Image (spheres, rainbow, N blue to C red):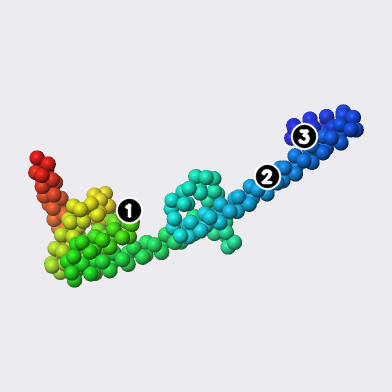
Amino acid sequence: ELHEVVARARLAEAPPAAVDHLQEVRAVDQLHDAQRDADDARRQAREAEELFAAAADERAAKVKELVDGGADVNETDSVGRTALMIAAKHGESEIARAKRVIAEALAEYIDTSDVAEISMRLQGLRMPHFMHEAVKSALTLAIEKDARIRDLMLELLERLQESGHISTSQMAKGFARMQERTPDLELDVPGAGKQFEALVRSSWIALVRQKAAARKKRG
């Protein structure tokens, strides 16, 4: 505002020829400003379109690249959805798919006892941060089914952690999620709480054996 006041004062004091020149310069500046604004608007629209597409396709690296480059995550598409809303919607479907794959893989493992096959299917999900769901699902089967399946699930979890397909943190998270679910499971499986405690003890003993074996191997 101060800049405008000074400019008007100078125009009032300048001779007519100088006024015309200053007005021409000002018109050119305004034209350049308008052109720059139009270019910025087109760039933002292009970035928003790319961001929506990347979010829908779950290309996390591309989303990060666009956001780091200045793309507005609050920009909306033609129906009022932001890129975050699109990503959330697709993320839910991806989680549902992962749960289905985990359930199918565990059911197949019960029939085949093929650790290599289930390891490959879990790794194929490319969701190492979601392996706690596999742990929780395996523990649920161990509690709901018979002793043979319980032993199969414990062996599977031990092998998956030993091979690194499920990290220690994801294993712990899976047990924690199972503990939260136990009260509800008690309604269908009386004594589920005690069975879960027994599974925890068995898993802890297995972990101690793993660590002892690792120390012996290093020594």
Give the quadrant of residue 151: bottom left
Q: Which residue is mark 1?
A: 129
Q: Which residue is mark 3?
A: 4
Graded by Cα atoms within 10 Å as few (under 14), some (14 to 19) or many (20 or more), the crowding at tag 2 reads few
Q: Is residue 14 left or right of residue 83?
A: right
Q: Is residue 12 above or below residue 98?
A: above
Which of labels 3 and 2 is toward the front? Answer: 2
Mark 3: which amino acid? Glu
Q: Is residue 213 above or below residue 24?
A: below
Distance of label 1 from label 3 (alpha carbons): 57 Å
Mark 1: which amino acid? His
Distance of label 1 from label 2 (alpha carbons): 44 Å
Residue 176 visible: no
Q: Earlier in the sequence, mark 1 or mark 2?
A: 2
Q: Earlier in the sequence, mark 1 or mark 3?
A: 3
Label 2 near label 3: C-beta < 8 Å? Answer: no
Give the quadrant of residue 149: bottom left
Q: Which residue is mark 2?
A: 36
Which structural element holds mark 1? helix
Which structural element holds mark 2? helix
Looking at the image, which residue is at 54% across and 45% down?
70
Q: Which mark is residue 30?
A: none
Which of these two is toward me, 31 or 152?
31
Looking at the image, which residue is at 54% across and 48% down?
71
Which of labels 1 and 2 is toward the front? Answer: 2
Q: Residue 62: where, in percent of width, then height?
A: 46, 52
